[in-house]
Every structure is written in C-alpha cells, then in structure tokens.
Amino acid sequence: MESGGPPAVPGQPGQTDPVLGLRSLSFAYQGLLEIPYDIILAQQDTLEVLDLSYNVLEDLALLVELEKLSTLILDCNSYSSHVKFPYMPSVTTVCINKNKISNLPIFVEEIQTKFPNIKILSMMDNEAAPSYFNGGSLTQYIDYRQYVISQIPRLEILDDTEVLGKERAQAKKTYRMQRTREGSKRKKELHLANVALNQSGNPSYHKFYNLSKLGDPRYERLPFSIRVLLESAVRNCDGFLVKPSDVESILNWKQTQTQSVEVSFKPARVILQDFTGVPAVVDFAAMRDAVSKLGGDPEKINPVCPADLVIDHSIQVDFNRKTDSLQKNQDLEFDRNKERFEFLKWGSKAFRNMRIIPPGSGIVHQVNLEYLARVVFDQEGFYYPDSLVGTDSHTTMINGLGVLGWGVGGIEAEAVMLGQPISMVLPEVIGYRLHGTPDKFITSTDIVLTVTKHLRQVGVVGKFVEFFGPGVAQLSIADRATIANMCPEYGATASFFPVDHISVQYLEQTGRDAEKLDYITRYLKAVAMFRDYSNTSQDPDFTQVHELDLSTVVPCCSGPKRPQDRVAVSDMKTDFEACLGAKQGFKGFQVAPERYATEVSFRYGDQDYSLSHGSVVIAAITSCTNTSNPSVMLGAGLLAKKAIQAGLSMKPYIKTSLSPGSGVVTYYLKESGVMDYLFQLGFEVVGYGCMTCIGNSGPLPDPVVEAITQGDLVAAGILSGNRNFEGRVHPNTRANYLASPPLVIAYAIAGTVRINFDTEPIALNNDGKEVFLRDIWPTREEIQAVERQFVIPAMFKEVYEKIEKVNERWNALKAPSDKLYTWDPKSTYIKSPPFFNGMTKQLQSPQSIIDAYVLLNFSDSVTTDHISPAGNIARNSPAARYLTSRGLNPRDFNSYGSRRGNDAVMARGTFANIRLFNKFLNKQAPRTLHLPSNETLDVFDAAERYQEAGLPLMILAGKEYGSGSSRDWAAKGPFLLGVKAVLAESYERIHRSNLVGMGVIPLEYLSGDTADSLGLTGRERYSLVMPDTLTPRMIVDIKLDTGKTFQARMRFDTDVELTYFHHGGILNYMIRKMSEN
C-alpha cells in the first residue's frame, strides 16, 4: 500500500516511528483493497496473530515471510474457492468465514496443501455451488463436515465460534491500523480500478491481477501467449508448486526463452474425449484403490481443476446413404459401448468437478469452441484468462479464439486434474505474419495446409506460434480455429491468435450473453491482452518471424500418408502417379510400372463398375478441423446444390458420410436449404463425432474390398480431417488425402484422385455434357452471403441449452454411486490396470537396464497410430484371440479406441497396426523377430516370451518417434510389454512426456548420430547403468554386448520429470502424495 509515512499507533497520536516486536495485528473493518505489507512485514520476527477481516483483499503471497504466524483471520473478504495461499507450515488456525467459497474440493485441497499443520479451521456462512451439496450454505449439510474432516484428518476444531472469538479478540486488542490521507487516496484509486469492469449502475467488486500495472517495460514486449503464462504464474504463485522464480523467468522471457528454463503452469481447466477419458477415469478408480491400500483417503483422488469430458470418439459409420443412418449408428454406438458409458456415468457421480457431455452432442473441439470456452473466467467475481490442456492433440483448436491450450498425454492431464502444475520448458515463440488477400475461391483448408507445410519446413517443434499482421483480421474465428487445429501437424505446442474484436463478434454469434462479452472485453483491454491486428505498435517481440502472403495460397490437399505433405490440386494427378512407382515411404507405394494401369471389374447392386489405382472408395466430410467452419460446410452444400442442378451424381459404392461437429451445423445446413442436395449426393448426417477421421469409418462393401485385394490396388480415401497416417482411415485405403469439404465432394463425384480439375471435366452429366469443377465451385462472396443469413445466435442457444439433457438413452443409464469402483471380472471393456500392483510408500531406486533386447527397429515418423491403433481389431490379431477367448464374436470386438479401459486388450493391441514397418522384417506387418529363437511372431507374443524369460526390452527409432495423436496408451502399451527405454533420433513432444509419465526412459541419439552411423542393427543387446545422480538432459553411456560403447541423451527435460521417474511414473508420484496425511 502506498503511504506518506508509518501509521499512527493507538494511544500515541501523531507518532511516526513504527512499533516493533508485536505478536498480534488487526486491520479489521478498514475496507482495505491491498494488504499493508510494509507494516506487517516489519513485525515478521514476532507476529503470531493477523486479522484482516472485513476488507476487500487479494494477494496473500508475501505472507509467506511470516515464519512465526500461527493464526490467520480472513473473514468477509470476498475470497472465492480459488483463493491462493502461500505455503505456511507455522499456521495452525485459519478463519475464512463469510466469503464466497463454493467449490469445496478445490478450497479444501488448497488448505490442506498450504497449511500442513492446521488444527483449527472456521469457514462458516460460505455459499455452496449447486453441484456441491445442492446449493445453499455449506454448513447446512452433514456432508460438509464429513467431507472437510475426511480430507484434513489433522483438524482438531472445525467451526467453533467460542475458540475463534478469543483469537479474534486478542488480535484486535493489541493493535488497530489507522488510515492516513494518502492511504485513503490509494484505496479510492484501487476501488475505481476494480469497479471499472462493471457496467454502469452495477458497482459490485471484481478482482484481477493487472500485470500492466507492474510498470515493467518487459511486459508490454511479451508475446500475448506468454502473457497468459505469466498471469497464471502470478495468480498461482505460492512458493510451493509455483515459485516466484517462475514469475521472474516468464517476465524475463526475452532472455530466458533460449536457456531451457523450466517453469510451472497451472491451466484453468482440462478437456477430455472418451477414447482418452475412459482410461483416465479407469486410472483414477485404480488410484483410489491404491491410495486406500496404502492407508490414505481414496477420496483425495478427485479433480480439483474443472474437467469436461465430451463423448465423441465412439460412433462409427456402420450405416450410410439411408434416411435413418444417424439413428441406426447412434443405436449401435450405445449397444456397443453401454458398459463404457455406464462407467463414465459412475465417474460423473464419484468424482466432483467433472462434467460429461453425452454422446450425440458433437466433436469435443467444436463443442469447446462454441460452448465450453470461457475466454475469461469469472470465478465468483475474480477474473483471469481461460486456459486449458486436453487429452487430444487437437486441443490447440481453441487457440483460434484466443484461449491458450494444447494437448497433453492422458497421464499428464490426470495430474493436472489432481492439482499438479505442468512442468514445461519456457518455449520460444515464432511470430507468423499474415498479409495479403486470399483468392475468392480459396478455403480456410487451403490456407491451413499451406501453413502446415511451411511451418514443418521452418521447424517449430516444442515452440509456440503466434499469428499477427493485417491478414489475421481477414480471417473469421472459424478460419483461425482451423489453422490452430492442425498445430500438431506442423509440430508446434500451441498456435495462438490473441483475442480481438472478431473474437468478441464470434462469442456474440454463438450465443454468449452481452454481460459476458462486456467483461471479457474490458478485462482483456485492462491487462493488455486485447489485440488490434492493424496496430503494429502492439506487435510484441518474437524469437523469429516468418510470414505468408495469403494471395499466394492455391487450392490444395495433403497426402497420401502425412498431413504435412501438401499437394496443389492442379498437381494431384501427376503427384499421385509419381507416388505409385516411388520407393515405399511417405510419398511412395512401390508399384511396378506394368501394374500402373491395373483395373478390376466388380458388380455392385445390379450394375458393373471397375476400380483402379487412385479410385476413391471413401469420401468423408468429417473432423473438428473443418466441420466447425460454416464457410467450408456451406461451401460444400452450395457445391452439392450446383452439382445436382448440373445433372451430376456419385457412384453408389463410394462410402460417403457427413459427421458434423455439432448440432448447429445440421441446423444451418437445413435452414439454408442445402442439406437436401448433400443427401442426394450421398452425404447425409451419419453421426456427431470424429468418425472417419479417427478411423471409425466402418466397413466398405464386400465387392469393393474384394476388388481392391484382387488387384492389390492403391485405393484412395478423401476426407476433411487432420490425420491421414497409414492404416488410420481404413485398412483398404492406402492413399488418403486431406481436403476441404467442397473438394471431398468434388473428388467423390470424379471417383478418382487421378484427375486434373483444371484441364479435365469432373464428370459427364445426364446428357453426356462435360462439366468442369470451375462451373460448380461457389465463390467466397456466395458463401458469406448465405452464412450471414443463416448462421445466427438463436441456433447456438437452442442447441446448447439442452446439450447435457437431450440424449434420453444417456439419461436412462444406471450407474453405482460408490466412491470405490466395483470391478467386474467378466468385463471386456473396463479392467483394473496393473500399473500400481505391489506399490509401496517407499521409493525404489531406479534400476539399470542390463542386456536388453530390441523388440522393434523403426525408421522415421513412427506415429502413435502405429504404436497404439484406434481403429478396427483385426480378426487374426492377439487382441482378437483374447476377446474370442472371452466369448465375443468378431462383430462385437468394436475398436481399439473403445477398449482403452481394458489393459489386456490394449497390451495386445500395441504395435498391432497392419502398416507398421519394422526393419527386422523389411516389410509392413504387426509382427517382429524374436531374436533368441529367430522366429517371426506377433509383437505381443514376442514380448510375452521375453517377459517370461525375464529379459528387458528396448525400441530403436528414427526421427519424430510418437508423432500424431496424444494417446497415453502409446506409452502404457510398451510399458506393459516390458519396454524399459526407447532410443530415437527425436520425439514428438507429447509422446516423450507420456513415456516419462509411465517410467519408460526416452533416450536420444547425440547430434549427428543415428543407428546407421553407429552401425546398429538392432540385434545387439543394450545396457544402461543408471548413474547415482540424475540431472535433466544428461548424457549417459550405452554399452553393447559387442563391446562397443556410445553416448545418448536421457530426455528427462526437467527436475520434475526426474522426480516422476524416481517414483516410477507420474501417477505413482500422485498416489504416494495423496497417501500422506
């Protein structure tokens, strides 16, 4: 607090020398807006009791210096559940009555963490949120006392007014602060700052950390994304989980960005989808069991960070081209996944702070964009920026709205939900300047595929990308979200578009209320986080700057095997034909020249057709990348309308589908009149979920599969998705291209990717007349006119008001309410995992790896789809044999993704992708060489033999190991197979983190070294003697049984990661922590 001099002391009017050696201080009923630290800290050597009641106080961080303080009184200060205390082991009494504490689990977790010796707690007359104890006052409910005492067992007194009254009286008796004229002036200034965010006539207090008031010129030069990290560090700084050094490191980003400085980040929330959400809830249930066995309170395993789980990965395209396809697919989804859904329903009851969005609602990232995103949190009058991590790599889509977020592994997300910060290396930030105007025929998909290829070439792995420049203002939020969505494909951690007026317009369009828009705008402007892209004076400092002239973007696709392999539409025919004969690889299928013209005839329905290399057999408008964008969805609808009017049709054997990201899409497609035309071409709504993009494309017609197999054809899939890795979309489509929704329709009409739309007609119409794509392609102006008329706020409000209640089958599901889950030994979906078997409270020393065999020997770009596929379970696989032994028929196998709650299936499904290329075999197959016997076996069977013999395993890999989806089973699976370490040239960020989280050692070749340069064949046996002291990124010796030794880097990048490793993984660490009293 600013002041002209020390305050007066009662009984000694006018005295200016401070009184020292006080044991108690009271500042109650002063209406203060800042804690008078200058006075309080002068007493830090003796102060035991501090009363700050009936003020409007905020930051408590500096109280950490009061090492003798035993009693802290904070009554009636408008503190919310998210109040952050410093770590104060000396405090035994805390009074925090008459505040705004509503979220009990979050607050109690804070109390028991920051006051490890607390014995007396008073928190009367606080309001409960509706989701906790049904609203009203906390103390009205018996559950309230039971819960608090169970979570803080060392408490001796809870809400005893007589005892607490004596403490408060003692504080008031000794000293009372007198306000000075300067102090009153400062209070008035702060009051005006706090109420400035309110609409006139509503002067209630709102609080926030205004970092622009630091007066530090470094803040104004920070990238906007780094400002979000800084605000979180300041708000959560407690000297324990988030330290003052984190704040200073982030503020000093310009110097620290290249120094591999570790900082802690606590995101505001977590988002999950069901493929990763089910194993997360399974882990939580198993962790509760483990904590209970170790003598702790199992209910401590409970989210303290808000979490939303959207069920969107379970539905498959089993039915299409029928008016009832949607209903049939949804019914089949429920029949297949009822057991999983019942388990999730149990989780929603057993764990507080977890909300589940039922199946049939939409795709997680679109629901996040349109409904879940706060942009700015208003937590009981306390403002802070929205931020999140998610268990899906495309969580980055939310960056398009100005919300900082990225994908993490499920293991790491579970720790965040339990209150742990993310330990991260402070990233470099690449500025990406957009300028110019895109051509009227260009879509946002064309732009993002161009950006993806460019940034892959730049090299942005592990970095933030922040967009700026006049071109950004020309992009809608849906366009920006499309670009941010594919951030994992170009390798960055996050791709950030700071909030501007277009962001606010989008919030209005999607039905957010006016009051929310007002405080979002005012708050972000107050803290210098609101962007004007035309104002170059706002451009911050960046590590590097790259740029794209939007006028140079041309229509394009990406493929045939990777998202970053952009191909101009005008070059598609020649590029595909070049890929046919090229050596097996990302751009090659190694087809012999004499087979280029292979054609196979087949009969479908009552007509004869033929397939050749490049024939389109799957055409899917799918994925959060594009279905969230009205411009490309309406563009597809308008193209369909023009195609029908031009007399064009589509071959009936092509598996077509439309899976919108939310019900809003269906709404505006119907209202604008284009849905009927889409249906006539075969693109009717088949479900609301990821579907084809995640590999849930369903079966192809048998005659089509037989023709592809007979001719060994390179058939094509075309989808508006974000991933096209081998074996992901469908086992029978070896070439898969990502494209905008209009281009998906165009290639489906053409029936092949071997076409040059510039020079060849897309098809002949009913009269035999040639029709070119340019004849039916809608312009940007046409699309925008329809969008302005039909994409309106009322649609969003109507859809999302009932989103959590509209699914009747979900509402009717019954689930137990026990806090500990009762595992069903007959279940093939949900099984208690063995991760914590035999776990003790005591740490075990990390074990050396001696004479490990190599299980698999890989080249570059092995994806998490290769490691842990999500799609169909092949009938001849180890997982199929297991399920058959449990009495299931193949039609009931479902997918690997849906079986992630059962470790027995997932261990057998690890490395089960049919497109897995293993150097030991020199061909694609989910098999490997069992080196001791020289037998070729399924990977699981080989690993089982090694484990039965007590032999440790390693994996050798090239660059970008673990790229693709952020699936934790790509680390859990190898762990269960007995893999102790992976040695690779480089790692995808999330997968490396997942390996650390499971206690698997990520080793990296030193710069310039590769398996080839070191002469490694994979047939050697490898040893790593664990050093006595481990440090981040240390170099270790790898010894071979041949006598050769080389060095590699151990990729534990932070001290926190080393802590997790010592515990055997991050979940083991959390269990031990939660087992402590």
Image (cartoon, helix red, strand yellow):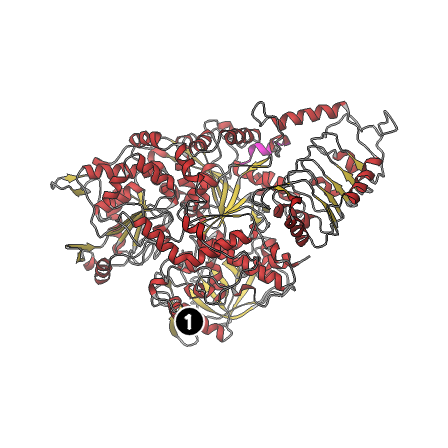
Crowd around label 1: few <14 · some 14–19 · many ≥20 (10 Å): some
Farthest residue to the right: give it.
11
Residue 440: x and y in percent read: 30, 32
Q: Mark 1 falls on what kind of element?
A: helix
- The percent coordinates of residue 901 (x first, y second) are 47, 60
Q: Where is mark 1, residue-wise?
A: 941
Viewer-proximal residue among 414 and 593? 414
Residue 315 is one of the magenta-drawn residues: no
Q: Can you give x and y, in whole percent of width and height, for residue 1036 in the image?
A: 56, 62
1036 lies left or right of 295: left
Determine if residue 352 is in view. Answer: yes
Whether residue 231 is situated above or below residue 704 in the rendered picture = above
Q: Is residue 434 left or right of residue 28?
A: left
Front-most of 430 and 503?
A: 503
Q: Which residue is painted at 19% across and 59% down in the image? A: 594
Q: Please, is residue 908 above or below residue 36 in the view?
A: below
- Where the N terminus falls, by quadrant? top right
Query: Which of these two is toward me, 146 or 1031?
Result: 146
Q: Is residue 458 visible?
A: no
- How many marks are shown on the rendered structure? 1
Residue 221 within the magenta-colored segment of the rendering: yes
Range of residues picked out in magenta: 214-223
Query: Hey, what amino acid is under mark 1?
Result: Asp
Secondary structure mostly seen in the magenta stretch: helix
Give coordinates of residue 797: x percent, y percent. 43, 35
| Quadrant of the snapshot with the C terminus | bottom right
Q: Quadrant of residue 743?
A: top left
**Quadrant of residue 433 in the image?**
top left
Q: Residue at x 39, y 71 (%)?
A: 885
